[in-house]
Image (tube, grey):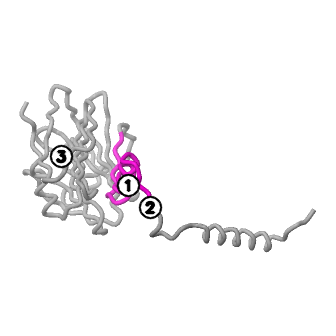
Amino acid sequence: MTFLSEDRLRQAVCEAGDLLDASLPEPDQCQHTFSPAFEKKMKKVLRRHRRLPIYRGLQRAACLFLAFLVGGVVLLSTNAQAREIVFGWVCEQIEGAQRYFHQGGIASTSEIVHYQIDVPDGYWLDEKIQQNTFVNEHYTNENGLYVDFFYQYEIDSSHGEVFIVDKETDTRSVEVNDNTATLYLSHDPNSSNTIIWEDQETGALIEVTAFMAQDDLIALAETVMPKEE
């Protein structure tokens, strides 16, 4: 039986790799047509990689500190009187992200108002998810860019939350249809940006994410209107 040293085994692996690499055709000679289903999946993977990370959940964890953004972060944990007057969707900073969750009065299913958005020309509805308390519409175009439109309510039987990863972003306070909104602008010019706000009339938390600059994204958000039933 022949025993090979570790160095000899390492050399043999490198030689085998070189032989395999030499047996492959040149890149410009590799022609392959992928199936439409595979290309669609790859486009979704690329969109997820480029987007500003947003996570949505249906379970709300207990928290010790509540915060909301009105010209800055205000801690409410030590002020009982302040906690009493804060209701609706509030925000707290957790490690590397902003967490939006609801406290105070809740809506009934009969009070839920549905919304619509005017997406730019060239976009089509790629996917829609709708449940009792939230709607998520995903629009895309032929260049792989997208508009993600989401809104959510809080009712007695369902607790929701939204996490926006705010590392490598700038945040700005803006207005959308007379509502205070927070704009998240990515430092990466090839990533999407997000704007999120609460409609004070309906209690809905609304979020729009798109590959748009600040002014264009605000203008798009202002097209969000209640549907006429």
Q: Amino acid at mark 1?
A: Ile
Three-letter code, disc 3? Glu
Which of 148 and 36 lies nearest the eye of the viewer?
36
Check the image and report above or below for 70 versus 199. below
What separation in Å lies between label 1 and label 2 (alpha carbons)? Answer: 48 Å
Which numbered disc, 1 or 2, marks the residue closer to the eye? Answer: 2
Query: Circle 1 — which element?
Result: strand
The x, y position of residue 42, in whole percent, is 39, 53
Q: Is residue 87 visible?
A: no
Neighbours of disc 2 within 10 Å: few (<14), some (14-19), many (20+): few
Q: CA distance from mark 3 to mark 1?
A: 20 Å
Q: Residue at x 34, y 44 (%)?
A: 56
Label 2 amino acid? Gln
First of labels 2, 3 by sequence position: 2
| Quadrant the C terminus occupies | top left
Residue 50: x percent and y percent?
Answer: 34, 60
Span shown in magenta = 31-57
Residue 35 at x, y = what percent? Answer: 40, 48
Q: Does residue 63 belong to the magenta stretch?
A: no
Q: Secondary structure at mark 3?
A: strand
**Judging from the image, what secondary structure is the residue with disc 2 in?**
loop
Q: Foreground: 56 or 48?
A: 48
Q: Which mark is residue 94?
A: 1
Pointer 3 residue: 198
| Distance between the alpha carbons at the discs numbered 2 and 3 | 50 Å
Disc number placed over residue 219 in the picture, else none: none
Image disc number at residue 31: 2
Neighbor class of circle 3 (other Cα within 10 Å; few <14, some 14-19, many 20+) is many
Which of the 4 image quadrants contains residue 109? Answer: top left
Q: Residues within 10 Å of mark 1 (few under 14, many from 20)?
A: few
Q: Are marks 3 and 1 in contact (CB under 8 Å)?
A: no
Tell me if residue 36 is in the magenta stretch. yes
